Image (cartoon, rainbow, N blue to C red):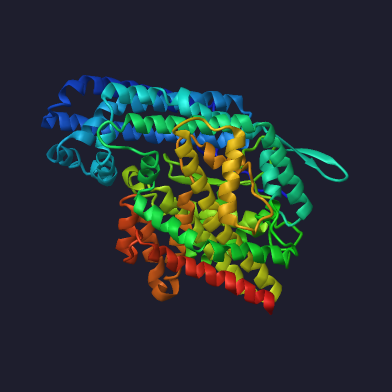
């Protein structure tokens, strides 16, 4: 079983192509021009005149133009390395593009500081430009951080150290995971596979495959646990030190950036986690029911991503059929969403192959210069793979409905990005359940509700609580691999209770999300998106023909306001209160109870 090969050659034929090399020459020239323009302007930034404002506007426009081309090149390199982590040409160029972005960021420091600190009259003059005014919300959010800015020299230094600093640690993890080999020890044979294939095997119907793959992954990461510990300690230490340096006027926590990046307040996050904690016992019931179906007292860790053993076909679903299942489910909500799936398939914008040097995970990315999305995954035909395909296509549809908007309006946070992806998964699950005829089919389809509840309301809070406690401890010193294992065990046990046979002690090592250089706390947005998407989906029948315009309006506003304001505007709800989250959790609990009733029939 193998998935499709994506087409990225329509962007650049290759790294060595004239098209790629010409764009590289173009952006390096633009960077040099920007550096000169900003250096010429620096003396006027303290007391800007109308002429200064015009020059700033021209710089911002030139910067955007440069970013669009550079980001397109960066995405191309990232896509190339995702399918072949051993591509040395791509690795070399990725290093160069990272340095380029660092230099671009350094060049813009004086202008960005001026925009953050200038008075309202100057700020409004800068935003009087028809195109630049679309960046108002983004710049207003940056102005809120003015108390945490450093001097120009310090900000420039901080940016210059990013690539050889925390970015290098993230690169190390990518290199390690991309080249890691997993030994699969079957009773009658031994196989050596890449990490992406081993991870895909943990989602298959065959328990032996899942067990062998899971144990192999654990063994592989056990050998590299000290490297993984060094990476997460370095990343956390960098962020903590940065926050401390920025606390000169107003205290800054390691949570400031993840909250700001996701455009929510601590009060909203606390309300959501509190709602999950208050219902943890009820959600653990999902795990117990899964174990019961598997004829086990407790779930074993290689069962967490398994398809339902009742009605689960041992036959892998070919990609064409899997994509058609997703398309048909989307058609129940909107013909436009179904057409989008067909377009993605027809244009070969989906990557799903099993390859030896392929990186793990799944994502949706896009090429800014052409406003074209791409979906990346390893497709092996499991129900979980079909769910992942729907999830990533949900992301793709989100960016597709915004493709006519400016870059300043498209910078939506992960909290709202995950809303679109989980909404797509919910649509798929609902469609499968609606068309299920036999008890076995209904149980198989409702199984996804149990896995979703466990993943978003138990596993994600585990990640958040682990990372929060780790960062608190990291303020004082680094933590060893054994200490990280114990911390993960403690948090895992607290949230999973007795529904798993043990804790995944190495979860912090083998989960990519803990090792991303550019983002910390890459976890709570998933729970946010899950519960928010359920809240949106619950209004589908109520709104009828008005639902899709409402949904698209929500998606198009995701880059223009905070999550609190967005949900108040479109749903009239206050997400800083646990009551909002509780309503969605009640929907989840009803799904769990429905599954239990199916078992009793």
Q: Which residue is at the front of the view, 231 or 353?
A: 231
Q: Is residue 84 left or right of residue 570?
A: right
User: Where residue 287 sits: x, y (%)?
Assistant: 63, 62
Towards the viewer: 23 or 478: 478
* Residue 123 rendering spot, x and y as whole percentages: 17, 39
Residue 122: which quarter of the image? top left
Q: Residue at x 40, y 26 (%)?
A: 102
Residue sitting nearer the eye, 524 or 113: 524
The picture places residue 100, in percent across and down from the top left corner, at 42, 25
Residue 30 visible here: no
Task: Pinpoint residue 14: horizontal percent, then vertical percent.
Answer: 56, 30
Q: Is residue 566 left or right of residue 17?
A: left
- Quadrant occupied by the C terminus: bottom right
**Left or right, residue 398 beside residue 85:** left
Query: Looking at the image, how many numbered discs can be counted on the residues?
Result: 0
Q: Is residue 417 visible?
A: yes
Q: Is residue 12 above or below residue 497?
A: above
Look at the picture and state if 13 lies above or below 598.
above
Among all residues in the image, which is located at the extreme right?
Answer: 188
- Foreground pick, 58 / 577: 577
In this rendering, position of residue 472 left or right of residue 245:
right
Which residue: 43% across, 35% down?
Answer: 71
């Amino acid at each position: 079983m193998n998935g499709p090969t994506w087409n990225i050659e329509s962007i650049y034929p290759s790294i060595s192509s004239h098209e790629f090399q010409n764009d590289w020459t173009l952006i390096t020239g633009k960077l040099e021009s920007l550096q000169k323009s900003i250096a010429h302007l620096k003396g006027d930034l303290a007391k800007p005149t109308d002429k200064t404002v015009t020059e700033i506007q021209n710089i911002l426009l030139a910067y955007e133009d440069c970013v669009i081309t550079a980001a397109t090149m960066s995405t191309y390199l990232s896509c190339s390395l995702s399918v072949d982590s051993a591509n040395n040409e791509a690795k070399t160029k990725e290093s160069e593009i990272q340095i380029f972005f660092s230099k671009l960021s350094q060049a813009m420091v004086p202008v960005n500081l001026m925009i953050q600190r200038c008075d309202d009259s100057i700020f409004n003059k800068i935003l009087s430009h028809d195109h630049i005014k679309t960046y108002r919300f983004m710049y207003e959010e940056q102005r809120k951080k003015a108390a945490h800015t450093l001097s120009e020299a310090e900000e420039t230094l901080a940016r210059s150290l990013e690539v050889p600093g925390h970015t290098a640690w993230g690169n190390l993890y990518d290199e390690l995971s991309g080249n890691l080999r997993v030994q699969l020890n079957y009773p009658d044979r031994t196989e050596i596979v890449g990490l992406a294939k081993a991870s895909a095997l943990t989602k298959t119907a065959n328990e032996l495959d899942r067990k062998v793959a899971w144990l192999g992954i654990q063994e592989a990461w056990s050998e590299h646990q000290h490297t993984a510990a060094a990476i997460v300690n370095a990343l956390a230490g960098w962020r903590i030190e940065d926050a401390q340096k920025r606390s000169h006027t107003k205290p800054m926590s390691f949570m400031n950036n993840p909250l700001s990046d996701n455009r929510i307040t601590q009060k909203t996050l606390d309300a959501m986690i509190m709602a999950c904690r208050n219902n943890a016992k009820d959600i653990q019931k999902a795990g117990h029911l899964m174990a019961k179906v598997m004829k086990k007292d407790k779930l074993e860790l290689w069962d967490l991503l398994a398809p339902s053993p009742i009605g689960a076909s041992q036959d892998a679903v070919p990609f064409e059929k899997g994509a058609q299942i997703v398309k048909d489910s989307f058609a129940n909500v909107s013909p436009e969403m179904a057409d989008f799936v067909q377009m993605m398939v027809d244009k070969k914008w989906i990557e799903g192959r099993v390859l030896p040097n392929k990186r793990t995970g799944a994502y949706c990315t896009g090429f800014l210069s052409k406003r074209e999305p791409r979906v990346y995954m390893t497709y092996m035909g499991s129900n979980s793979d079909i769910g992942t395909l729907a999830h990533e296509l949900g992301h793709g549809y989100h960016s597709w409905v915004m493709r006519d908007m400016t870059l300043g309006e498209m910078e939506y946070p992960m909290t709202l990005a995950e809303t679109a992806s989980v909404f797509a998964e919910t649509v798929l699950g609902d469609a499968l359940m609606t068309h299920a005829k036999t008890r076995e089919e209904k149980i198989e389809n409702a199984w996804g509700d149990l896995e979703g509840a466990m993943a978003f309301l138990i596993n994600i809070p585990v990640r958040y609580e682990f990372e929060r406690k780790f960062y608190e401890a990291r303020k004082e010193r680094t933590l060893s691999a054994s200490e990280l294992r114990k911390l993960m065990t403690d948090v895992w046990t607290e949230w999973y209770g007795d529904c798993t046979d043990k804790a995944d002690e190495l979860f912090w090592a083998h989960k990519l999300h803990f090792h991303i250089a550019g983002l910390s706390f890459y976890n709570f947005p998933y729970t946010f998106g899950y519960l928010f998407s359920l809240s949106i989906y619950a209004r589908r029948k109520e709104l009828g023909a008005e639902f899709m315009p409402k949904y698209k309006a929500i998606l198009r506003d995701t880059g223009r306001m905070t999550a609190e304001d967005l949900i108040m505007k479109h749903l009239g709800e206050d997400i800083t209160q646990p009551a909002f989250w509780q309503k969605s959790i009640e929907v989840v609990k009803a799904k769990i109870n429905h599954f239990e009733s199916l078992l009793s029939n």
